[in-house]
Image: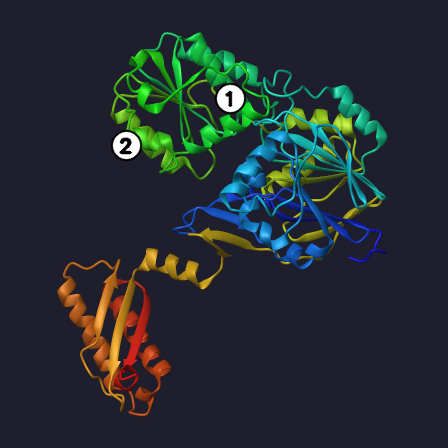
Amino acid sequence: MKKSDDRLLFLPLGGSGEIGMNLNLYAHKGKWLMVDCGMSFADDHFPGVDLVFPDPTFIEREKDQLLGLVVTHGHEDHIGAIPHLWRRFECPIYATPFTAALITDKLAEAGLLDEVQLHIVEHDGPFELGPFTITYLALAHSTAEGHGLVIETGKGTIFHTGDWKLDPNPLIGPICPSSKLEALGDKGILAMVGDSTNVFNPKNAGSELSVRESLIEICKGRSGRIVLTTFASNVARLDTAGEVAKATGRHIVLLGRSMQRITKAAKATGYLKNFPKVLDEEDASHIPRNKLLILCTGCQGENRAALARIARNDHKHLTLAADDTVIFSSKIIPGNELVLGQLFNMLASNHIRVITEKDAFVHVSGHPGQADLKDMYSWIRPHIAIPVHGEARHLIAHAALAHTAGIYHTLVPANGDIIEIDREGARKIDEAPVGRMVLDGDQVIPADSPAMGDRRRASQQGFVTASVVLEEDGELAAEPRLAVLGLPTNNPDIFYDQLLDACEIAMDRMKPKQRLNDDSVEEVVRIALRRLCRSTLGKNPGVAVLISRLEDEQY
């Protein structure tokens, strides 16, 4: 981008074609603006990995022209990558108070707090970053301080919705009246870049007040302990848990690090003002079972979360017993059905009642259904609709809905599409490199790194390591040593001897000159061992060959 370049560009690096990992870029007059920097949770495709991030290589190369990162709200899929990727682009960060509190906690944990310029922006106050004038517009969502961004440029105004829904009773945060959105539409919106996550729901998202009323009724009169598990970031639901505890005469205890972190941040920024006193875990263990409500993490069946530990009887102070009740006040995220099913069965086998969104009204989404989207389009009336934050099928359905709402210029983006926006519409003009990064231990590495491939192969096909010691002339100095990992065999000793024979026979067939070359020896042994595994076990394992020569060992 050059200063003379008057185009208005939009570039998603994450979140278009998937749910999670939101990272969006806008460009105008030679400058870039980043909106959100989120993560996603890894699946079985990345063994040993918990977190996945968008690859920021493109904006890293342009970081001298990057004015800042503006964060819409505090969900992990919008802020979770910040402490892991910030050094790649090193720009100031802008957020409202509650979101800033969550980011501060992450930066402190990562040792970045003294390096990052984190600016707290008050609601509804415009601020300028180069050619962009940005105003936060409060919208309901399933956390405190959900916001859309009104981004004014010399080419027109973008309304970047962030995650949102319409809720006449959001419980936490202000109601965004239709008059305010209509007034925004009256000013003229060039393009609305909007949330597509819940587009297949024909109705509206639903109100948090209705969930509160339902949960109080569900919990009244129940014997035993009640466990309420939900997304820790849903501040309104946490507030509801406090009201459930008060309405049913129960003490409340918080379990899970993120539950405690979010509650602390919410209280510090003026939310959860009437939340009841929280018991210490050890003190809670002495409370009569019918007088305790446990609010905890683990609503998606995460193995290390508080609920899973209680279910396994792994918690230091608290346990569950017959006639206790566990309420999953959350949506079952696609892909988590299997692990959640296992958790449900573990609880049920111990005669613990399980209540999910399929059994009772215990959850509403934080994302707009079709009714919400139609209302929003009728108020905002953008010239162009660009759906984001969804899989391809969500984006396509959202674009079709926008068209039926009278928005005739629509474009379905993919990560990496460089899109020009003007009065003639939106069109793809180029592509930027995109990819995935993963947090592997303490290291952020490319998702397609050899380490991932090797680990995936080992987890599926097993692994064989051969240590070969050679004389100076290339002859075997000793019998090779082998290590076998994860291969199915009924008689390990016999299989070991077969591998040993395959290794020695393959080397015997080599010409003397070939055995002087480490690469040749390594390749011959690898092929021989892998061929034997395929023929005898039907497996194609990873094979590592370690070669030592006696002449090397003298030094």
Q: Amino acid at mark 2?
A: Arg
Identify residue for label 2. Answer: 312
Residue 43: horizontal and vertical position, in percent? 43, 46
Q: Amino acid at mark 1?
A: Arg
Residue 338's tag is: none
Query: Relative to residue 243, is residue 503 drawn left or right?
Result: left
- Location of residue 248 with respect to 170 vertically, above or below: above
Q: Residues within 10 Å of mark 2 (few under 14, many from 20)?
A: some
Q: Residues within 10 Å of mark 1 (few under 14, many from 20)?
A: many
- Location of residue 498 with respect to 124 vertically, above or below: below
Q: Tell how many labels.
A: 2
Query: Relative to residue 435, is residue 511 drawn left or right?
Result: left
- Location of residue 249 with respect to 137 vertically, above or below: above
Q: Residue 109 or 94: which is nearer the viewer?
A: 109
Q: Residue 431 or 224: which is nearer the viewer?
A: 224
Residue 109: horizontal and vertical position, in percent? 49, 42
**Display coloring:** rainbow
Q: Earlier in the sequence, mark 1 or mark 2?
A: 1
Q: Residue 176 or 235: which is nearer the viewer?
A: 235
Identify residue for label 1. Answer: 237
Q: Residue 256 or 55: which is nearer the viewer?
A: 256
Residue 213: horizontal and vertical position, in percent? 50, 11
Query: Relative to residue 37, is residue 479 drawn left or right?
Result: left
SS for callout 2: loop
Where does the N terminus fall, quadrant-wise? bottom right
Q: Which residue lies at the image location 25% right of the left edge and 77% below the top edge?
A: 468
